[in-house]
Image: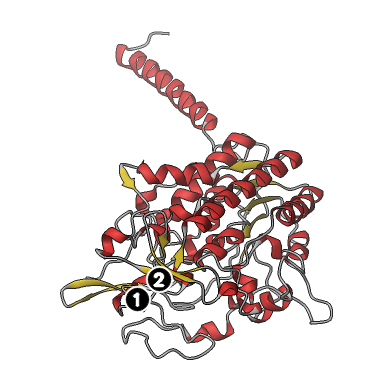
Amino acid sequence: MKFERNTLQNFVFIGVLVFLISCQKTEFDEFKISSGSADFSNYVSFGNSLTQGYSDGGLHNELGQQDNSYPAIIARQMKLAFPGLNFKQPTVTGSGSGYMHLEYINKEIKVIKAYDPGLVPLTDNHPLAIAEDPSWATYGSDKTIKYNNMGISGFKLVNVVGGGNTSANVNYFVSNVNPYARFLNWGPSNAMISYLDHIKASNATFFTNWLGNNDVLGWSTAGGDDGFESQFNQYFSKLSDVTEFHDKYDSVLTALKSMGAKGVCATIPDVTSIPYFKTITLQSVGRDVWFIEGPYSLNPGSVRKANADDLILLNASDELAKGIGLTQTKPLPHDFVLDKTEKLLAQARSIDFNNQIKLLAAKHGFAVADMYTYMKTLESGLTFDGVTFSPKYIEGGVFSLDGVHPNNRGYALIANKFIETINQQYGSNLPPVIVGNFRGINFPE
């Protein structure tokens, strides 16, 4: 048989093309997104406000803020490896619980606090403050829904079962006082259901666990006060005991291990390095600041000048603007300052808790995302996707206006750290997200 030259060339071209296509297919298969040894079919996240998607002083979703909580971001990446994953969050509607925002006022950018009616209606809310969404009053009323995001704002690790290192009835305060916990069924008063019970009923195949932040953060943001004046403040503000922390963290991991779940635990950041404690300084105030030293239990305490070792809290800015704290006769109340001794205690307690987290995670065979070290890198600046982030208030690009919780870009950074740890521990290859695709601080137009 005789082939024309062009015909022969066509056969050669087709053969090369088939070879290249087969090579490309093989290469694609090698980079197929995989879950490795993990099972993402029922991913459940446990934690507090950082897990729930809280930012700017509230839980809100009018621009998809809660939709981009770090667990939701992780779940979307997991879904690339396991398309059947259905990650449900107890998502609020619109402005949710209300939130802080920025406004141009007299040619200056001002932070407008969230409208907060509180236990007693306030009278000093700015007229431009964003109020609660009308649906907030019934948030979480459907207790039949089984959620994958079980983060509860204000929740502490030591509160996973009743008791806690406080005289308050923990389950009562979780179910009746903390509105962010309403989406879970806490049972009747004579047979209440604990958070640990909810963990046991989750049937998680994979989890992330970032419980523990509030066990030192709540005390620190209260100026180092244990809330002696009320059981309400004791529930939120009392500094947790290390031994109790160990025992209850162990109970959480024991429950997850018994159901055969795999997952990642996360350490606690140094709370004193966040904008809430770093923004108001003696230099920024430009004059002496006086405060009452000592918690409420030592009332009235002694009045002294703040020094560079004391941390003036972000919420003191309103008081200072009124002249409170600028003279010895009109000092800041103690809960607006974390003094040097309290700062050192907060830092040491965070390290103690982190040692327990690492110890217990190793005992049960779970991975650890070292958020303490990771968030420390922010202090000297962290460059990601060509953008440099820092803990500087508003300008740093990571934290929201409340100075404690990340904005969506910050949550994307956190999600990427979890994803990196998951890949390293379980042999998966979940891709990180592009941080620049997420919303940062919303500036007024």
Q: Residues within 10 Å of mark 1 (few under 14, many from 20)?
A: few
Residue type (three-letter) at the residue carrying disc 1: Asp
Q: Is residue 316 left or right of residue 205?
A: left
Under tag 2, what secondary structure? Answer: loop
Which color scheme does this rendered protein use? secondary structure
In the rendered structure, are the residues bearing label 1 and label 2 in contact, judged by CB atoms less than 8 Å apart?
yes
Question: Picture coordinates of residue 292 (x, y %)?
Answer: 45, 71
Residue 315 is tagged as: 2
Question: Picture coordinates of residue 333 (x, y %)?
Answer: 45, 74
Q: Is residue 407 visible?
A: no
Q: Residue at x 67, y 74 (%)?
A: 174
Q: Which residue is at the far left?
A: 107
Q: Residue at x 63, y 78 (%)?
A: 232
The residues bearing labels 1 and 2 have C-alpha atoms spaced at a distance of 6 Å
Q: Is residue 285 left or right of residue 16?
A: left
Q: Residue at x 51, y 32 (%)?
A: 31
For the residue pair 119 and 365, the one nearer the viewer reads as: 119
Question: Picture coordinates of residue 353 (x, y %)?
Answer: 64, 50
Residue type (three-letter) at the residue carrying disc 2: Asn
For the residue pair 3 and 150, the one nearer the viewer reads as: 150
Under tag 1, what secondary structure? Answer: helix
For the residue pair 300 and 311, the one nearer the viewer reads as: 300
Q: Residue at x 30, y 78 (%)?
A: 323
Q: Quadrant of the C terminus?
A: bottom left
Q: Which residue is at the far right?
A: 190
Quadrant in which residue 409 is drawn = bottom left
Q: Is residue 56 left or right of residue 214?
A: left
Residue occupied by mark 1: 318
Q: Residues within 10 Å of mark 2 (few under 14, many from 20)?
A: some
Relative vertical location of residue 164 with respect to residue 36 in this rendering, above or below: below
Q: Quadrant of the N terminus?
A: top left
Question: Picture coordinates of residue 5 (x, y %)?
Answer: 31, 11
